[in-house]
Image: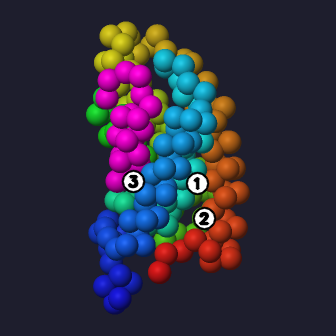
Amino acid sequence: MHLLKSRHPYQPVINTNTLIVSAIFVALIIIFTHVIAIQTPFVRVSFSFLPIALFAMLYGPLPGGTVAAIADILGCLLFSPGLYFPGFTLSAFITGMIYGYFLHNKKITLLNLSLASIVILLLVDLALNTVWLSLLYHKAASAFLFGRLIKCLVLLPVQIAAIYAICKPLLRYRIARPQ
């Protein structure tokens, strides 16, 4: 037990409880990404950021990124009509890492949430995912960058408010911290 308390945030913790919680969050991410989502070829509007942020907040950057990547692979295998593309898995992993870096073992403030969401917006949503889409569809990134930018700007305050509304009460009542 002493090793669990003094572990580094990037060091994974693997035990039965963590595996079960990870599987539940993988299922939640898949449901929020593929079942409860609005999707066009270039833009997806979903609430998959909620379970990713919550899991990364609880378990850290590396487990958060790993769970997001596993959910992306399984969700693609189960629900995607097209081919699997590993670039989006890398984007999911980086998203989980960023949420874990900004939220794990830190006070949940609007500043932390805003910074995490803005970094994800710029680095993952606008940069990486736009590159992946231009590689997949053989079109210039500028062809669909404007629509993606509008989506990101509209969803940014929604993401920050939703994560804050879910995470803050859980931590206040100490429901969500793993032992």
Assign a secondary structure to mark 2: loop
Query: Which residue has dot 2 on it?
Result: 108
Query: Are there few (<14), some (14-19), or many (20+) residues within 10 Å of tag 2?
Result: some
Magenta: main secondary structure? helix
Work out whether residue 74 or residue 170 is closer to the camera in this orientation and state it.
74
Which of marks 1 and 2 precedes in the sequence? 2
Query: Which residue has dot 3 on it?
Result: 67
Does 25 sit left or right of 1 as displayed?
Answer: right
Q: What residue appears at the point 41 percent right and 35 percent down from the top-left corner?
A: 78
Amino acid at dot 1: Leu
Does 6 sit left or right of 159 as displayed?
Answer: left
Label pair 2/1, CB-CB below 8 angstroms: yes
Figure check: 68 above or below 42: below
Please state the horizontal and vertical placement of residue 132, each as a whole percent of the image: 35, 25
Query: Are there few (<14), some (14-19), or many (20+) residues within 10 Å of tag 1?
Result: many
Figure check: 29 above or below 87: below
Which of marks 3 and 1 precedes in the sequence? 3
Figure check: 111 above or below 95: below
